[in-house]
Image (tube, rainbow, N blue to C red):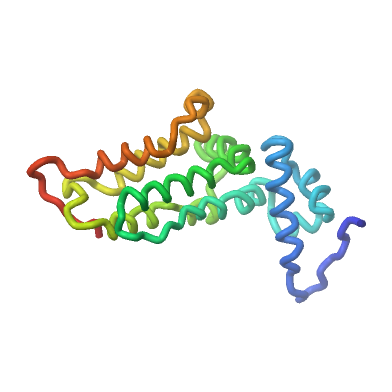
């Protein structure tokens, strides 16, 4: 097979197949070589396209990596059933699985460092991905009386997200290999009404 050297003529529709090949190749290179090894040249070689085809679509490797890994973080889309413990268990397992993908594990720490250091600004792929709406939907479907009215669901989600990121990205935490059920129990305790407190259904 030869490298794809086709250059689109003016007005010619962009070939989505090349986009897919590049994104698949990016995930494969991230998993095999890590973030530093995911250069445009390495991605182009894996996708069997010329680097010019990549640069016509993405300004740098950072944008390629963002688009390759972030959509996978939307995988935690759990249809609420009203059974809060079961729904939370499915949600946590789904999100941990998405965060645990080799390409995500390779890319996430480096991208976070770039954003925090101000060297890169998160693009729409990053800002548009959030499991928060799914979490809120699960709480909204919970049976009346199961949620503490004094607890802000956003605060609980932030705690849960931090714990899940730590399990995937922090080596000392990841080595403990705690079962996902412990996170679920922690969240349930945070949400559970105290004796005598007002309750609500999340909205």
Quick one: which residue is furthest to the left in this view? 196
Q: Position of residue 82 (x, y in %)?
A: 30, 59
Q: Observer-nearest residue: 134 or 35?
A: 134
State the count of labels: 0
Image vertical order of residue 48 relative to residue 115, above or below = below
Identify which residue, 200 or 14, lies in the foreground.
Answer: 200
Q: Position of residue 146 (x, y in %)?
A: 21, 50
Horizontal placement of 170 versus 36: left or right? left
Q: Residue 24, position in %: x, y?
A: 71, 53
Q: Residue furthest bottom?
A: 11
- Residue extending furthest top? 172
* Picture quarter with the C terminus: bottom left
**Residue at horizontal 80 percent and vertical 45 percent from the top:** 41
Q: Residue at x 56, y 41 (%)?
A: 100
The x, y position of residue 164, in whole percent, is 44, 38
In front of the other: 193 or 70:
193
Give above or below for 108 relative to 142. above
């Amino acid at each position: 097979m030869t490298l794809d050297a086709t250059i689109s003529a003016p007005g010619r529709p962009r070939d989505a197949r090349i986009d897919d090949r590049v994104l698949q190749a990016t995930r494969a290179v991230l998993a095999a070589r890590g973030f530093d090894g995911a250069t445009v040249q390495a991605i182009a070689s894996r996708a069997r396209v010329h680097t010019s085809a990549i640069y016509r679509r993405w300004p740098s490797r950072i944008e390629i990596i963002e688009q390759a890994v972030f959509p996978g973080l939307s995988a935690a889309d759990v249809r609420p059933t009203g059974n809060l413990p079961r729904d939370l268990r499915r949600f946590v397992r789904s999100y941990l699985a998405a965060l645990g993908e080799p390409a995500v594990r390779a890319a996430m720490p480096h991208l976070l460092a770039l954003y925090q250091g101000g060297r890169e600004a998160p693009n729409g792929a990053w800002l548009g991905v959030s499991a928060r709406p799914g979490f809120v939907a699960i709480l909204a479907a919970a049976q009346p009386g199961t949620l503490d009215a004094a607890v802000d669901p956003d605060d609980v989600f932030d705690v849960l997200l931090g714990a899940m990121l730590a399990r995937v990205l922090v080596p000392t935490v990841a080595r403990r290999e705690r079962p996902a059920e412990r996170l679920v129990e922690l969240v349930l305790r945070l949400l559970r009404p105290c004796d005598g407190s007002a309750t609500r259904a999340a909205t």
